[in-house]
Amino acid sequence: MTSTELVDLLVQHRTLGTAPLAELEWLVSHGTVRTLAPGAILSAKGEPVEGMFIILSGHVAIYVDRGAGLKKVLEWKAGDVSGVLPYSRLTTPPGDSVAQEPTVLLDIPREQLRDMTAACHEVTSILVRTMLDRARVFTSSDLHDEKMVSLGKLSARLAHELNNPVAAIERSASLLEDLLDEQERATMALGAARLNDEQLAAIAAVRNACVATRIHGVLSPIQQAQREDTITEWLEAHGLSGDTAGALSETAVTTEALDTIAGAVDGPCLDAVLRWAGADCSVRAIASEIQDAATRIAGLVASIKGFTHMDQGASAEPVDLATSLGHTVALFRSKARDKSASVELDVEPALPLVNGFAGELNQIFSNLIDNALDAVPLGGHVVVRVARELQGVVVRVMDDGPGISAEVRERMFELFFTTKPVGKGTGVGLDIVRRLLPHNDGHIEVESVPGRTEFKVWLPSADSEPQGAKA
């Protein structure tokens, strides 16, 4: 193909055809014509891209594997430009670019691009716009794929939690019948004790612990066993049976509250009081479990709707982080149990609302908590702490894993970078966190040493002026 024929093709080129003839001639004089057979790789994943490729005929597509198999994310046909573009930071592609049919292109070597920007101003301007369009396509694809991966994880966790709600209701109902009999016997014994007003007030404190409203984290099996052992020891120290320890350990009752009761009631009356309290707490807990199982399907629909922000508007709105994070932590209950790990949620009282997009914030914190649980060892601990700071709210996601090395910390927000085994990580989660935070006027900081890693996310409060992203 002669130089004149090549220039004629560029004049008709959809992307570059409007550039001055002299600039098109410069491209022809500095480029090389290449022909690709179907299946030939134009640029390979992880290898430096050699230059800019002006597609004259044919079809090239790039395939990326984000953990669920290869997927075509972008394609170029006659009239398009691929490869390295002016001012692009692209060094290695995220996947293989493969010829789909016989393809002819003009290859401008990477080392010629600096001279091209000086000699071909109009071509450079056209290609910069092309680069921005390509970046938007990749960003949209990344967000969509991460959303689907996150939604898949969400569905799996919820399916694990909802494995058999009907069986849970049936089991709880059968237990409830026996507990109601025990509660009736304990109530009769309590009535026979003829307690005075002071004594009744003391035992009311235990009952109130059963219905106390608070934000819960997830106790590890070891922590739960330790709590039950502590209450058992208290009961035995007062000459009582430890049979009620299991029921009392599921509530917010403290040994201090038990001491208060023991100071007001003793002997057989104390046994009757605690039997009644244990039965009452157990009945209430099982009634709550039945209600939870019966409404779990509605909760699943609400969680998916909130996670995907199906009804989210085009502008940021006030978001209640305490409620949002409470739901997010609950979704990781099964994963925490699988690792015998605990997830503690510590929210400052009267926390102000933040300004943002609820679905995007769910996605940010879901990724951070998921990564923290992946990092901790068996029996590890994850803490999510939320508090006011400056004109906003700070969410700290901390874990006691091995920490993040300096080398990994430099790259962990890069797209497709992951230290997880193949099939376990996509390398997209933290990149999505980095991209979504500026949209919510937030920023993120990371501190890590062996045994303690902290991701610190700052978000503006709903009544403050946006302060811009610092990530």
Image (cartoon, rainbow, N blue to C red):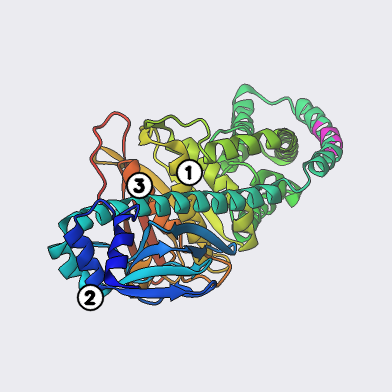
Q: Residue at x 64, y 54 (%)?
A: 334
The CA distance from mark 2 to mark 3 is 36 Å
Question: Which label sits in the foreground, 2 or 3?
Answer: 2
- Type of amino acid at the residue the image marks with label 1: Asn
Vertical arrangement, residue 306 with respect to residue 395, above or below: above
Q: Secondary structure at mark 1?
A: helix
Q: Main secondary structure of the magenta part?
A: helix
User: Distance between the Cα atoms at labels 2 and 1?
Assistant: 44 Å
Horizontally, residue 341 falls left or right of residue 276, namely left
Query: Farthest residue toward the left?
Result: 118
Depth check: 389 or 414 in front?
414
Q: Which residues are magenta?
A: 177-183
Q: Which residue is mark 3?
A: 437
Decide which of 233, 35 is in the foreground and name it.
35
Q: Which mark is residue 362?
A: 1
Secondary structure of residue under mark 2: helix
| Position of residue 226 in the picture relative to residue 382 (left or right) | right
- Mark 3, Cα crowd under 10 Å, few <14 / some 14-19 / many 20+, is many
Q: Earlier in the sequence, mark 2 or mark 1?
A: 2
Is residue 14 magenta-colored?
no
Whether residue 273 is visible here, answered yes or no, is yes
Tag shown at residue 111:
2
Q: Alpha-carbon distance for marks 1 and 3?
A: 11 Å
The amino acid type found where label 2 is placed reads Glu
| Quadrant placement of the N terminus | bottom left
- 410 above or below 299? below
Q: Residues within 10 Å of mark 2 (few under 14, many from 20)?
A: few
